[in-house]
Amino acid sequence: MSGTNLLAELIEALRCLPGVGARSAQRMAFHVLERDRNGGARLARALDQAVQRIGHCTRCRNFSESEVCALCANPSRDAQILCVVETPADLLAIEQATGFRGRYFVLMGRLSPLDGLGPDELGRDLLQRRLEEDEVREMVIATNPTVEGEATAHWLAGLARAAGLRATRLAHGVPLGGELEYVDRGTLAHAFGSRQVLE
């Protein structure tokens, strides 16, 4: 591609975003330079501030500008229920979609030996300290229904049992409003195998 080094550098920098290939990065760069330089400057400032000032909460590992995030600092949250999620995006999804009022722990990934992610990288020491020191009675395991997510859930359940806690797992299966004939085989098999007694 012809152009300046700065333009090539901008396009290459945009490719660090998930799902952004060379063509998408090029479209984004051209859009900012042709139509929205003010928006580009605002984006650059916000990105610079976020990278410089956002770290991790020392209690739950969620993104936070302070040492302890707002959720952990909120005294009205139920300290007896700890929901363990893979990512901050999962935490946000649960906060927005449910009435969950407990506390969280963010693994920042899932067990994946091929990617070099073992228990230590997922914050095992901090999680064990929270389970031993806090008033936690139940661990809600909210990992994704993938092979790695299931392995992570099994590991977490072992930690909960060792700490004498009740471990629960989010239900997986047929989506609300879904029709059985359109549900994929894996989801339907999992839902069928995890069926519950109606009372």
Image (cartoon, helix red, strand yellow):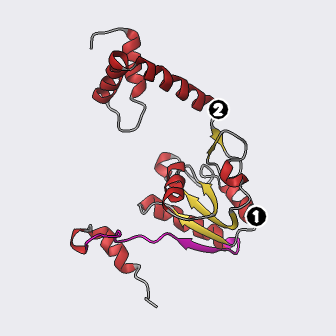
Q: Residue furthest bottom?
A: 199
Image quarter of residue 105? bottom right
- Between tags 2 and 1, which lies in front? 2
Which mark is on residue 134? 1
Residue 173: percent from left, percent from top = 37, 71
Judging by the rendered image, the residue that carries numbered circle 2 is: 53
What's the amino acid at mark 2? Arg
Q: Position of residue 157 (x, y in %)?
A: 58, 70
Q: Quadrant of residue 2?
A: top left
Residue 99 left/right relative to 164: left
User: As rendered, which of 122 and 171 lies closer to the eye?
Assistant: 171
> Which SS type dominates the magenta stretch?
loop
Could you tell me which secondary element the residue under label 1 belongs to?
A: loop
| Magenta-drawn segment | 162-179
Say which amino acid is labelled 1. Answer: Asp
Label located before the other in sequence (2 or 1): 2
Q: Position of residue 5 (x, y in %)?
A: 39, 10
Quadrant position of the N terminus in the picture: top left
The residue at 67%/74% (across/down) is 165
Q: What residue is rendered at 67% in x and 49% in y?
A: 70
